Amino acid sequence: MQNKITRNLLRFATDSQFRQHFIERGAFSLGWCPVCERRTAFAHLGAEARLSDRCVRCGSLPRWRAVIYTLQTHFAKWRDLHIHESSPYGAASDKLERECKHYVGSHYMPDVPWGQYKGAYRSEDIQHQTFRAGEFDLVVSQDVFEHVMHPELGFAEVARTLKPDGTHVFTVPWHGWQPTRVRTIEEAGVIKYVLPPEYHGNPIDDSGSLVITEWGADMPDLIEAWTGMKTEILRFDNKRMGMNAKFNEVFVSRKAR
Ligand SMILES: [Zn+2]
């Protein structure tokens, strides 16, 4: 799926006949991309906009554009902040790594001792992090928390590592019309499926990531109960910035001063 979209994106950029086909179908729109900060076109390369509406210049997806737009509108000096991003992937993560002075990206790499680096990334289990308390102004996670086995530990660790008034900016597919549903549980080290197993693509593991939690309307209350942090839900319907897609909310949880 991912490869097909990448191939289509390359064809869109290089093959004028292919581009013409899209223009005739009305399958792309002109706009401005918050990630590459240029005028661009968004190509609608698949049925699900969230997974396939690519900026033809930087390849960004709607939710990546929404995260960067959130930083640009809520944190004027985001490039100067101390930022931890859990499980970075894609054009928005690349931008953070490239443009932020104090950025650390971590991946769940059980084969690398926790807290050590493999290449550019630090090995961290989001549920038991080795960062000091109060290290970061900002923690970013993009489509991570639906895959964390014990999200109460993960959110508590995010809160611990944030400075007072620090913020967690994150995305998850949010089923706001229903309560949160736990799809998978772990009992004595054994994984049990409460609901049929569902997997999402994982940039560092071809077998994909198992969905643990289907987050719903009560997610902000759960986060507050686990961490004391209040969560604001930002919705975007901006077609010109290519941010109009289902499941395109950005969540902003703030630690008390
Ligand atoms: Zn772009």
Image (spheres, helix red, strand yellow):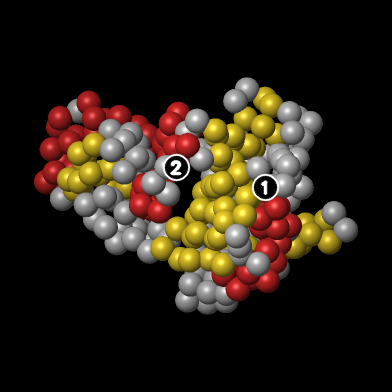
Q: Which mark is residue 78?
A: 2
Residue 153 relative to residue 84: left or right: right
Residue that appears at 20% across and 28% down: 15
Percent position (x, y) of residue 5? 37, 39
Instruction: Report if residue 87 is visible in the image.
Output: no
Instruction: From this view, report whether residue 77 is shown above or below residue 212.
Output: above
Percent position (x, y) of residue 175? 50, 69
Q: Which mark is residue 134?
A: 1
Q: Residue furthest bottom?
A: 178
At mark 2, the secondary structure is helix
Q: Residue furthest top?
A: 119
Instruction: From this view, report whether residue 197 is shown above or below residue 163.
Output: below
Instruction: From this view, report whether residue 237 is shown above or below residue 67.
Output: below
Instruction: From this view, report whether residue 222 is shown above or below residue 134.
Output: below
Q: Nearer the viewer, residue 255 or 214?
A: 255
Instruction: Mark 1 and ligand 1: say if the CB distance to the nearest ligand atom is below 8 Å.
Output: no
Instruction: Report if residue 191 is visible in the image.
Output: yes
Residue that appears at 15% across and 41% down: 21
Q: Nearer the viewer, residue 26 or 94?
A: 94
**Rendered-image quadrant of the N terminus:** top left
Residue 83 relative to residue 244: left or right: right
The amino acid type of the residue labelled 2 equals Trp
The amino acid type of the residue labelled 1 equals Gly
